Amino acid sequence: MNEKYRYVKIVEWSDEDQCFVGSCPGLFYGGYHGDDEKQVFSDLCQIVDETIEFYVQSGKFLPPATSGKDYPNKMLTVA
């Protein structure tokens, strides 16, 4: 399996920023901003690929995977 599939990618609307924000918790801090939801997700996936490549080229261990943790259902219990 490709490592990029091990990380949850989130795109959500930010009222504060008035744009979509894409993030990948656990892999990197910060996020990617844009006006088009699909483009933000596409660019976020590219950033995830580049981040993983950086880890590998630097000889660093990747952070623990965030996929498979059932985050959507866990968020429902918090709300």
Image: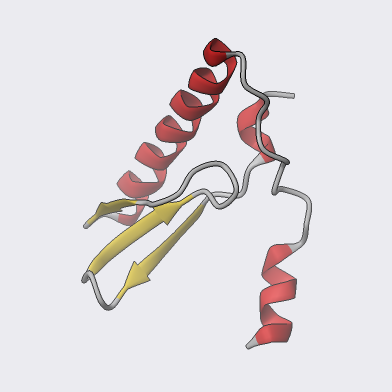
From the viewer's perspective, is 7 left or right of 14?
right
Q: Position of residue 51 (x, y in %)?
A: 48, 28
From the viewer's perspective, is 30 left or right of 64?
left
The residue that appears at 60% across and 48% down in the rendered structure is 26
The residue that appears at 48% across and 20% down in the rendered structure is 54
Between 9 and 53, the one lying in front of the other is 53
The number of numbered discs placed on residues in the rendered structure image is: 0
From the viewer's perspective, is 25 left or right of 78?
left
Between 29 and 7, the one lying in front of the other is 29
The residue that appears at 60% across and 31% down in the rendered structure is 4
From the viewer's perspective, is 51 left or right of 62?
left
**Residue 1, relative to residue 32: is it above or below?**
above
Q: Quadrant of residue 14?
A: bottom left
Between 21 and 26, the one lying in front of the other is 26
**Residue 43, relative to residue 69: is it above or below?**
above
Q: Position of residue 17 (x, y in %)?
A: 23, 69
Return the residue found at the far bottom.
Answer: 79
The residue that appears at 41% across and 65% down in the rendered structure is 12
Q: Quadrant of residue 75?
A: bottom right
Q: Position of residue 69 (x, y in %)?
A: 78, 57
Which quarter of the rendering shows the C terminus?
Answer: bottom right
**Residue 35, relative to residue 67: is it above or below?**
below
Which quarter of the rendering shows the N terminus?
Answer: top right
Q: Position of residue 36 (x, y in %)?
A: 26, 54
